[in-house]
Amino acid sequence: MKPVNPALAATFSPPVMEARRWLAGISFPPERPLINVSQAAPVDPPPEGLRQAIADAALNRPEAHLYGPVLGNSDLREAVAEEFSDAYGGKVQPAQVAITQGCNQAFCAVIQTLASAGDEVILPTPWYFNHKMWLDMQDIRAVPLPCGQGMLPSPEQAKSLIGPRTKAIVLVTPNNPSGAEYPAELVGQFYDLAQETGIALILDETYRDFDSRPDAPHDLLTRPDWDQTLIQLYSFSKAYRLTGHRVGAIITSVERMDQVEKFLDTVAISPSQLGQIGALWGMQNLRQWVAGERLEILARKDATMAAFAELPGWRLKSVGAFFAWIEHPFDLPSNDLARLLVRNAGVLALPGTMFTPDDDPTGAKHFRIAFANVDGADIAQLAERLVNFQP
């Protein structure tokens, strides 16, 4: 096959798809079914009311089957602007909001407005692998920023990594893969650093609806001219179970939106109409339901903390939103152990090597546990299988 883009060819394969291939040829008896903690995407459909709203639109709204505005429908942009203004105590205008085909596309779009081949973007490690993949595909260097105590990145260390070709720092909070919730003060320090050095701060808050803190997780939207430094990303997939409809959002300056529009028009023309209709209905009608979902996830977080506190040899490094970052007690690297966990324990989890640079030894010592789709009983069963696991 010729030719092949060398940057794309050199990019690693999608980790979740690779993990699913480990299941080939393995059967799991009814008395010990597979415990799948590899992916956080909700497996249940949206609430019936939201599904009905989408069905009604599909049947009765002709415009739901046509191209829409490249930057998203005005009613959804307005709702996002109002929601983020209220939640963060700042002021977001609808013109500062774009709707995208999922949050991954939102990240890709803003990177295209910021950087080109040979530039650099700082990613705390462990990183979200799709962020790293997109940077690799664009021949943009991902500069790793190792996290320290509590799986938190250091602004001082980040400052030492900024060079003439650095264009942005990316923070994901609550974090994927570690689950760590970045304190408001820490997020503010990264904002100050980005503002001081003239780079962008990309803040991915895909999991903001499941943050354990009752108040706003940062104050960045209250700061003067915030949109000249901050680019905020959001996903509707987790809160409203709209993963298959692909609806995300970008919040940034109107000037940058001009560049975002070019990218989105080229790769998708417009976001999914039915997905946007569902997202808007969810924002307008499911506030209490989402609050209940948040409490359930926080209960699973507590169950995970309790389970690993009693698990000899395994160490819980951080936990939050849908994820736990755990250190295993074995001499084998996590990428080898992951396959053995499937065969010997009936557990599918992603190894830390999927979230770290190849030369980072911490990846080999850790796993990401995604508990969004396992309840308290499943978490207890997971702990039992891990305590009895032998490679």
Image: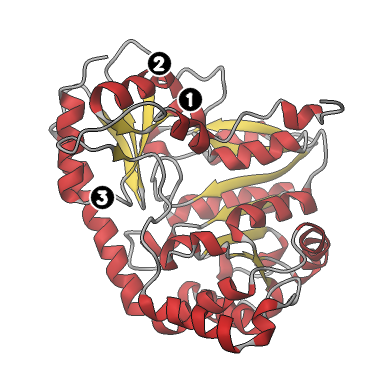
Query: What numbered label is drawn on residue 353?
Result: 1
| 3D distance between C-alphas at marks 3 and 2 | 26 Å
Q: Secondary structure at mark 2?
A: loop
| First-in-chain label (2 vs 1) | 2
Q: Tell me what residue is drawn at x 18 percent, y 38 percent.
A: 30
Q: Which residue corresponds to mark 3?
A: 301
Q: Which residue corresponds to mark 2?
A: 333
| 3D distance between C-alphas at marks 1 and 3 | 23 Å
Residue that lies at the very extreme toward the bottom in this rendered image: 60
Q: Amino acid at mark 3?
A: Lys
Dot 3: within a 10 Å radius of its alpha carbon, few (fewer than 14), some, or many (20 or more) residues? many
Q: Secondary structure at mark 1?
A: helix
Decide which of 278, 366 is in the foreground and name it: 278
Q: Secondary structure at mark 3?
A: helix
Residue 43 quadrant = bottom left
Q: Please say whether residue 257 is visible from this viewpoint.
A: yes
Q: Tell me what residue is drawn at x 72 percent, y 46 percent.
A: 197
Q: Is mark 2 in CB contact (under 8 Å) with mark 1? A: yes
Q: Position of residue 234 (x, y in %)?
A: 55, 62
Residue 145 quadrant = top right
| 3D distance between C-alphas at marks 2 and 1 | 8 Å
Q: Position of residue 250 (x, y in %)?
A: 64, 64
| First-in-chain label (3 vs 2) | 3
Dot 1: within a 10 Å radius of its alpha carbon, few (fewer than 14), some, or many (20 or more) residues? many
Q: Position of residue 132 (x, y in %)?
A: 62, 37
Q: Is mark 3 in CB contact (under 8 Å) with mark 2? A: no
Q: Amino acid at mark 1?
A: Thr
Q: Tell me what residue is drawn at x 63 percent, y 75 percent.
A: 273
Decide which of 115, 44 is in the foreground and name it: 44
Task: Establish if 89 lies above or below 127.
Answer: below
Q: Position of residue 9 (x, y in %)?
A: 73, 27
